[in-house]
Image (tube, grey):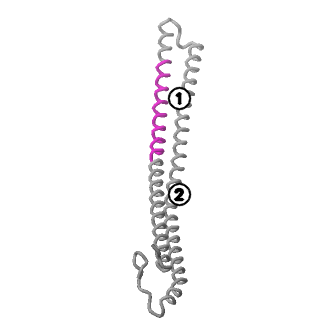
Amino acid sequence: MSFDPITLAILSTVVGVAGAAVTTVSAINSANYQQQVATQQARVDNQNADRAEMVAQVNQQDRDGAAAAAIADETAQQGASGLSIGGTSQILTRKSAMQLSRQDALRIRQAGDLESYNDLVHSQASSDAAAAAGRDAGFSLLGGFLSGTGSLLGGYRDYLKVAPAAAQNYGSVSVPPPTLYGAY
């Protein structure tokens, strides 16, 4: 099977344009998928940040309640044992227990706030990745267009090179369209 130069120029152009189109569609689909994944991850990270704040608040309240119950129990035991609950030592013991429990509660809240902040930072990074994937889709479309245009222009250039020679080979008669097998 042999092809004349005009047929080869046309086939080369068609294959080049088709390849550019397939590559472009694939790149756009991939970029759109990456954008969807990153957007979903940003949503999940925001939800995780909210949950971290709520859990920290609940844990802080639980710690405050447990400390208050422990101090009340200690006070009741002191009173039941016959000790004066108004004594300096007893008051200082309860005051120290309240301060330590408050510090624990604040550490619990601070850990929750830090976890929430980390989730928000990750959410922002995911949002940025989603935006970048969206830009990639646009650039893929532009790249595919430019590649296809380049294939068309290259094919036209090849046609212009071979068309005069083909016309000379066949005389002044116009060249009929080629068949699939290159025979006329």
| Percent of width and height locating residue 14 | 46, 73
Up-down relation of residue 39 to residue 60 (above or below)? below
Question: Is 64 included in the stretch rendered in magenta?
Answer: yes
Q: Secondary structure at mark 1?
A: helix
| Residue neighbourhood size for the residue with mark 1, other residues' Cα within 10 Å, grouped as few (<14), some (14–19), many (≥20) | many
Label the magenta part by its dominant secondary structure. Answer: helix
Name the residue type under label 2.
Ala
| Percent of width and height locating residue 179 | 40, 78
Question: Is 45 included in the stretch rendered in magenta?
Answer: yes
| Residue neighbourhood size for the residue with mark 2, other residues' Cα within 10 Å, grouped as few (<14), some (14–19), many (≥20) | some
Dividing the image into 4 quarters, which one contains the N terminus? bottom left
Name the residue type under label 1.
Ala
| Percent of width and height locating residue 107 | 56, 31
Location of residue 101 (image quadrant):
top right
Residue at 48% across, 63% down: 23
| Badge number at residue 115 | none
Q: CA distance from mark 2 to mark 1?
A: 41 Å
Q: Which span is picked out in magenta?
A: 43-70
Please state which of the two labelled residues, at mark 2 or mark 1, is closer to the viewer.
Answer: 2
Figure label count: 2
First in residue order: circle 2 vs circle 1: 1
Residue at 54% across, 50% down: 125
Up-down relation of residue 6 to residue 30 (above or below)? below
Dividing the image into 4 quarters, which one contains the C terminus? bottom left
Q: Residue furthest top?
A: 82
Q: Which residue is mark 2?
A: 132
Up-down relation of residue 20 to residue 163 (above or below)? above
Front position in the image: 88 or 77: 77
Front position in the image: 51 or 61: 51
Q: Which residue is mark 1?
A: 105
Front position in the image: 72 or 30: 30
